[in-house]
Image (cartoon, rainbow, N blue to C red):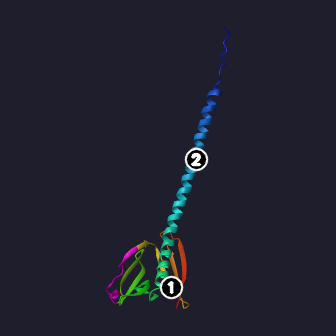
Amino acid sequence: MLNTKKKTGPIEFVFPILLFLIFTLSALFIILFAAQIYQKIVDDSSINYSANTALSYVSEKIRQGENGDGIEVGSFEDCDALILHNHVKEVDYATYIYFYDGALYEFMAESDRVSEMTVGTGTAILEVADFTITEDDNHLISFTCTDESGNKSEAMIAISTE
């Protein structure tokens, strides 16, 4: 009887193992690369969140306040403030939005009781590194917000005078 069994060499054993190792390493590198891209997207998203959310919030408050009794840029105990005036049921109210101690704050009080309030009064809306408010002669309010990473965002809103 003839032996029909073919003798296998080491290459026939090593080749499938090498092919499997190459496939596994390629998959691992793709996963690591995708994880780095995902982390960068998350970091960029959180950077945009702080500054842009603060500007969007204040912009929306101004748009809501245009239906009220007035909008002004003033101060609240040495802090620049956006002041929104409203008149509800024979009572004058003022909403103050200001930057203090690394956060944007907001509070609403009767206009004649604002002098009783102290800095830090209200709700901390969002933590930011810096927030400035300015108004020019053409009723254009400018906002600049700097987040904790040092990224700066700016917005401008024209106030209707009618």
From the image, tell me which residue sits under label 2: 29
Q: Which residue is rendered at x = 51% and y = 60% of the image?
A: 42
Residue type at mark 1? Thr
Q: Which residue carries the number 1 mark?
A: 134
Q: Are marks 1 and 2 in contact (CB under 8 Å)?
A: no
Q: Which label's residue is closer to the chain start, 1 or 2?
A: 2
Quarter of the figure with the N terminus: top right
> How many residues crowd mark 2 within 10 Å: few (<14), some (14–19), many (20+)?
few
Q: Position of residue 21 (x, y in %)?
A: 59, 37
- Between residues 63 and 17, which one lies in front from this camera angle? 63
The answer to whether residue 116 is left or right of residue 70 is left
Q: Residue at x 56, y 90 (%)?
A: 138
Judging depth in this view, the residue of 78 and 123 nearest the camera is: 123
Q: Is residue 131 above or below residue 8?
A: below
| Percent of width and height locating residue 16 | 62, 32
Is disc 2 placed on a helix, strand or loop?
A: helix
Q: CA distance from mark 1 to mark 2?
A: 50 Å
Above or below, 135 relative to 41: below
Inspect the image, locate mark 2, and give the three-letter code of the amino acid beneath it.
Answer: Phe
- Asked if the stretch drawn in magenta spans residue 114, the answer is yes
**Badge 1: few (under 14), some or many (20 or more) residues near its Cα, within 10 Å?**
some
In front here: 27 or 87? 87
Q: Measured from the top left, where is residue 150 in percent x and y?
A: 51, 71
Marking on residue 28: none
Look at 55% across and 54% down and name the residue there. Answer: 36
What SS does tag 1 mark? strand
Magenta-colored span = 112-124
Q: Is residue 10 above or below residue 61?
A: above
User: In the rendered structure, does residue 46 fall within the stretch colored magenta?
Assistant: no
Q: Position of residue 156 (x, y in %)?
A: 55, 81
Q: Nearer the viewer, residue 93 or 8?
A: 93
Q: Residue furthest front?
A: 89
